[in-house]
Image (cartoon, helix red, strand yellow):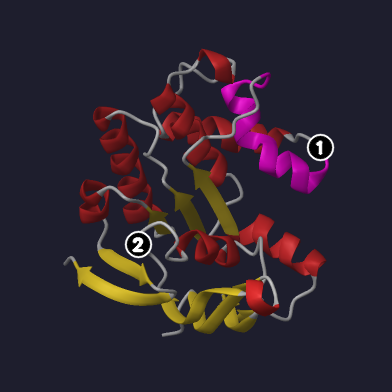
Amino acid sequence: MTALVEVRNLVKTYGEGEAETRVLKGLDLDLETGELAALLGPSGSGKSTLLTILGTLMRPTSGSHRMLGEDLTTASDRDLTEFRNRHIGFVFQFHHLLPDFTALENVIFPAAVEAGRETREARERGRELLVRVGLEHRMDYLATKLSGGQKQRVAIARALMNQPELVLADEPTGNLDRESAMQVMDLIGEINGREKTTFLISTHDEKIAEICRRQICVVDGRAEMGRERA
């Protein structure tokens, strides 16, 4: 079976000459469809750079990056943007909601950008997603009126708006209290199990990592496979 994501000998270098810094040093990684994986590593190990490349927001210096069988290292910027909008969702530590928008407007924003307008179909899917994340009574609340945990639930719904195969989550619980963090992880686990959406979650929290079925450690610019939970 072909992996959803295949990365081979990935290298990312910043700067030139004496100022050159190699962050990724020949990293290999596969992600299968339906995985729930944690991405671990100390600060400066390269995991944020890896997430950025996997999200097609930055190109590697060398190596190969394929997803859904497509070679993303040779794709044009326009093709990368279209691919990202269709197949990849993002959840960040800071939810990055638009403060003057309601929860529903924030969720449907990616679809509105892709279509060039807000559609009835997008509003219906946005409402469905907010029901699924337990915010059916907060759809018309401005983002500023939501709690931290509620904002992150909206961010997860937004990441799922365009039905991506892969969701990249960068410290999605890092700004939440423990109860809210566990609720967010329960939600991610439910979506992963029901829809087989692949999640790669960058975290420093061991308890969050233990919930994931596989742990991938980035050490000195390379990926080391941690334990895998049955």
- Quadrant in which the N terminus is drawn: bottom left
At a point 41% along the width and 46% down the height, the residue shown is: 171
Mark 2: secondary structure: loop
The foreground one among 62 and 198 is 62
Magenta-highlighted residues: 100-116
The residue to which callout 1 is attached is 117
At a point 76% along the width and 48% down the height, the residue shown is: 114
At a point 25% along the width and 62% down the height, the residue shown is: 213
The residue to which callout 2 is attached is 41
Is 94 on the left or on the right of 13, as rendered? left
Residue type at numbered disc 2: Gly
Quadrant for residue 33, please give it: bottom left
Residue 218 among those drawn in magenta: no
Q: Badge 1, how many Cα within 10 Å: few under 14, some, many 20+?
A: few
Where residue 22 sits: x, y (%)? Answer: 55, 75
**Given the current orientation, which residue lies at the most extreme left position?**
230
* Spatial separation of the CA atoms under disc 1 and disc 2: 40 Å
Where residue 60 sits: x, y (%)? Answer: 63, 75
Where residue 29 sits: x, y (%)? Answer: 43, 78
Residue 104 among those drawn in magenta: yes
Label 1 or label 2, whichever comes before in sequence order: 2
